[in-house]
Every structure is written in structure tokens, then in C-alpha cells.
Image: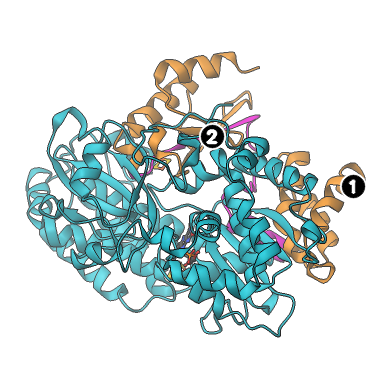
Amino acid sequence: MATFYGSRNKTMERHVLLRDIDVPNIREIDVYLANDGYAAWKKALTTMKPDDVISVVKDSGLRGRGGAGFPAGVKWSFIPKDVFPKYVVVNGDESEAGTFKDHQLIDCNPHQVIEGTLLACYAVQANTAYIYLRGEFYEPAQTLQKAIDEAYARGLIGKNVLGSGFDVDVYIHLGAGAYICGEETALLSSLEGQLGQPRLRPPFPAQQGLYAKPTVVNNVETLANVPPIVLHGAQWYRQFGTEKSPGTKIFCVSGCVNRPGNYELPLGQYTIRELIEMAGGALQGRAVKGVLPAGSSAPILPASALDTKLDYESLQAAGSILGSASFVILDESVDIVWAARKMVRFFKHESCGKCTPCREGTHWALQLYNKLLSGYGTLDDVNMIGEVAAQMSGKCFCLLGEFATSPMLSTLKHFRAEYEAFVRAHSGGLRNGYDDELIREHVIDPAGNLIAGAVGQKRH
Amino acid sequence: MLREKRAQDIEKVLAKYPPERRRSAVMPLLYIAQEEYGYCTPEAIREVAEIIGCDPTEVKSIVGFYTMFYEQPVGKYVIDVCDDLPCALRGADRFVSHCEKKLGIRVGETTPDGKFTLNTVMCIAACDRAPVLQINKQYRYALDEQTFDRMIDELP
Ligand SMILES: Cc1cc2nc3c(=O)[nH]c(=O)nc-3n(C[C@H](O)[C@H](O)[C@H](O)COP(=O)(O)O)c2cc1C
Ligand code: SF4
Ligand code: FES
């Protein structure tokens, strides 16, 4: 199997989530079963009431790992008891730039994801779970389907599981390439066969989710935490992490480091600087210029914030978010204007087009960055970027539009001098090495001339 | 006709969703149609619409919304190279330029013999193993110019 991971360093004595690092072949059901696998599932079905499962998850303080950090047990307790059917939907869209933790969980420890899903189903009394995976997870989906089939064959999924009288089915649904489908209401629309565009909230999915029925939506990693919590208890779980950010979390480290990869750590114990050191330090011993703690969606933090602790509260206090904990490291050789343009391009590409501020704002912002990068930018354009972002802020239908402003506003905030130096150094069409990218993206022609419509005017 | 050729697969897909929610099957059915026809042809769209019981224009709008459904014919091998920020910090742009040179086409184009289509894509959740690409949805990790060339030369 071609599943080779960038870094599989042991960051914990015993991992709670990335157990594949400690236990070879835990993706096989027999190995999983021999290592406490499905023990929590059996425990819940034979000795716990559904509400007991909700309680232990609530007490553990487990917070959603998909970005928003909402307490999972509390979310489950919102599900009405008297409405049927109900659904559990697992969010495996994993499309935030720099995020690859759910990918490793599914590839290497799929049964723990399934077991967590089953426990969520039992807790809220849902008989059906859909695991929504991004379309590019075609291969991981095969691994996961094989694991689901094995669990069916062992009587761990299906009718009257282990004689408990509880019926449950688990299905995989593949997306087809759209970041917005990671947003939970867009995901539900996509799963219903509609365009993957966000819906108004309220009603929240807990009231009217899939097919307008009560629905729990949780991230893959969130649910992978549930089996150990149910098996060992909330107190055991709370030995890791802090009061407000309990447990362990997978940190995805990418960009300018020597050993990019997934690092599972107790929340709040280490700093960003220590995380970078674990990942082998910056490439070629260079200094770190900035860090994106949650991919393109999180405000960039400058090097002065490297001693920030890795938990929800500390990152917020430092002016960013923990989000999905996808740490993209930028070293001193990286051009901030170029990096910001990459992120803005992402949001322009992924804007679903439903609302005007995001659809138009990301379009115009990218044009401004195109102008800067192709060597025709002015200081007015730099100011205009800030203005476009400010115009979008607070006016978009969903958070994607809000996220889109963060690379613009945060790089301007911390690195404005670099923007100005960039403009001074690249005037009159003078460029420094971005020609290939700009030609590829139809900003300039092979002779180096601007293509009409690529900057400053709408093309379609 | 999809319904005859892929009857079993279609049944399997439909069985995942409540009978009155057939529309949920639109994406998996489009994948099946694409496997059969190479891309989402007007014929494929009509058939999928018929199976789930909705208007073909609605299915067409779904096809247009998602990047993994093709509205035009594509090469035998579709190569999607990630050039999003985390990969670009590790040389993805230079790598894409090399892919263009090796295949003799620009991003977005198909080789004249119809063998390869080259695209760039946003993050595909494998940034720890950059440069990374998918070829017909199969990951190829930690590539360099030599391994890319070898992969291309060895494909039938
Ligand atoms: C634009 C956007 C993209 C998102 N992408 C993802 C994603 O890929 N995976 C994910 O689990 N949550 C994603 N979320 C968060 C989900 O909306 C939702 O909060 C989450 O799935 C809830 O699960 P959790 O409580 O377990 O984190 C995204 C949110 C937004 C606004
Ligand atoms: S903010 Fe962007 S992604 Fe969200 S609904 Fe509006 S256009 Fe769509
Ligand atoms: S940026 Fe290329 S896989 Fe994530």
C-alpha cells in the first residue's frame, strides 16, 4: 500500500488517536480488536444507556476538531429524543489547506473512526450514519469501506448489534471537489443531492439537519476521540490538555519545516516554537517569518507569537484561531505578497457564489494581487486590498467569506512594510520569478504582457 | 445505457439512501456515469436525471458545481497536481512547470494523443508529502522530476 506518511515521530508515550504509530497494522480489524478495539462499543451497548454516553463525552470536555471547537457532548444533548429518524453525519471533507489529519486517521486507524461513529449513533439513537468524504479521498474511502465491511461481518454494525436490539448502518458518501462542502449545512445540502451551498441557521442541524431530521455533524477526528473516552472515562481523558481544552489534538505541520507531518500532542502543553522543533525546525536553519495556525482560514501570526501555547484560548488571545490545527510554517525566504495571493486564489476558487460580497470580493481581491505580482501594483492597490476585505467583513452569508478576508487583513496588519517594499521593487512590470505561475493562470502572456481582464476588470 | 450496464452498482448506490430520497444518489451516480462515458455527457446527465427522478438541468448544475465532474472529454489519465500554498512552499510551482514541460502541454490541456490531461488543484490533504498529485484519483506522494518522468514513461 502506497500509504507513506511524511513523519511518524513518537510524540506521546501512547497515542490516543494516531495509534498506528504505536501499533503496527492497527488498520486490520484483528489487530484493532486485540488492542481494545470495539471494547467501548461493547461496553456502551451492554452496560450504558444512551444518555450515559452523552454524559461521559460531555464530562470529558471534548471539543469539535473540525474548526469551531464546540463541545461534542453538548451538541449531542441538543438532539430531540422524540423525533425519528435521526442521523449522524461524519465530516471528512478535510479541504482546509494544510490539513491532513483525517486522511491519516482513515488510512491508518479506520476502525477507531468507525467505532466513534457508532458510539455517536447510539448516544443520540440514530440508526444511520453517513460518512461524507471529499471526492479526492477515493483511495481512503476504499480503506474505510473495507473496514466497515469487516465490522459488519463481525456483527459490530447492522441489525440488533451484539444482541442489544440496536440497529445501525454506516454508509460512505463521496463529495466531488468543493471546499465549501466542509461547512456543515453545505455538506448536508450536498448529501441531499442539492448544490453544495450553505443554508441559513437556524434551524441548526440538531433540529433540522439531513432530510430535515435531527442530525449530529461531527468531524472525523472528533469522533475518533470518543472510543477511548467511553472506555476509560472522562477523568482519564482530562489527564491530557487543559481545563478548557482537554485531551489530545493532532497538529498538522506543513510548509517550511524539515519533517512535515501529523503530531499528536496534549492541548496546551507545548508552544508553536516547540511544535516547529518537533517537526525538525525550519528548512535550512532559516528563521520563521510567520505561522498560519489553521491553514488559509486563520490569521497569520508573526514570529513574535511563537511562544504561544497550543490550545484554543491561547491562540485566540494571540490574535488567531486553533481551528483544525493545520500549522503552515513560512520561513524568512517566503514572499508574503505571493503567499497571500495563493490563499486569496484558494478562496476565489472555492467561493460557492451564493452571496455577492464573497463571490465578488474574492474575485476583485485576486485581481489586485495579480496586479501586484505581475509588477504593475501601486500603493493604492495595497490599500484597496484592505478595503475590499473590510467591505466583505461581516457581510458574507457563511464563514468562508469571513475566512477569505483573514489572509488579506492579517498579512497587511503584520507585514505591511513587505507589501510596500514589494511594490517599490516590482514597478513597471518588473517581476521576480513568478512568470510561470502567472502565465499558467492567464495573468500574463508568454511575452510578459498583461492579459486583458486579468487585473482590474471582470472577465466573465 | 447505464441502467443495463451498471444495474448492480446503481442498485447498491440507491440502497444507501431512503427510497424517497433518491436524489441523494446524484453524485455517486454521476461517478458511475463518468466511469462509463469518460465524462458527463448530455446522455449521461439525462440517464442520471431519469434514475433519480428530476430534471436534467438540475443534474447539469450539479455537474457544473463540482470540480471532479467533467463537462468535456478528458485524457485517459487525468493528472491533478496540487499547487496550493503548503505544497508551493515546497516547490510545487516549479514541479508543475516541469510537468508541463514533460507532457508538452499547459495546465488545463490534454495531450494531442488524448493520453494525459494536466490540471492544478487546491490542497488535497497530503501537504506532508509534497509535491503530490493524483492520477485518476490515485495519490502519488513525495514526487520529484525523476519520479514524475518515470511514472509518465511507464504508463501504458
Ligand atoms: C468554509 C468552512 C469549511 C469547513 N470545512 C470543514 C471540514 O473540512 N471538516 C470539518 O470537519 N469541518 C469543517 N468545517 C466546520 C463544520 O462546519 C462543522 O463545524 C464541523 O464539521 C462540526 O464538527 P465538530 O464539532 O466535530 O468540529 C468547515 C466550516 C466552514 C465554515
Ligand atoms: S460566503 Fe462565499 S461560500 Fe459562503 S455562501 Fe457566500 S458565496 Fe458561498
Ligand atoms: S497543499 Fe498540496 S496537498 Fe495540501
Q: What color is chain B drawn in?
A: orange
- The x, y position of residue A289, in whole percent, is 15, 45
Above or below: residue A337 compared with residue A223: above
Q: Does residue B79 show up magenta in the picture? A: yes
Q: Please tell me in which quadrant of the rendered image residue A125 appears.
A: bottom right
Q: Which chain carries label 1?
A: B
Above or below: residue A423 compared with residue A319: above
Q: Nearer the viewer, residue A67 or B146?
A: A67
Q: Mark 2 lies on which chain?
A: B
Q: Is residue A192 left or right of residue A19?
A: right
Reading the image, the residue beneath label 1 is B7
Kind of residue at disc 2: Gln
Identify the disc placed on residue A206.
none
Q: Residue furthest front?
A: A47
Reading the image, the residue beneath label 2 is B134
- The x, y position of residue A220, in whole percent, is 53, 55
The cyan one among the chains is A
Q: Are marks 1 and 2 in contact (CB under 8 Å)?
A: no
Above or below: residue A84 compared with residue B103: below
Q: Is residue B138 left or right of residue A397?
A: right
Query: Magenta segment range?
Result: B58-85
- The x, y position of residue A316, in whole percent, is 24, 66
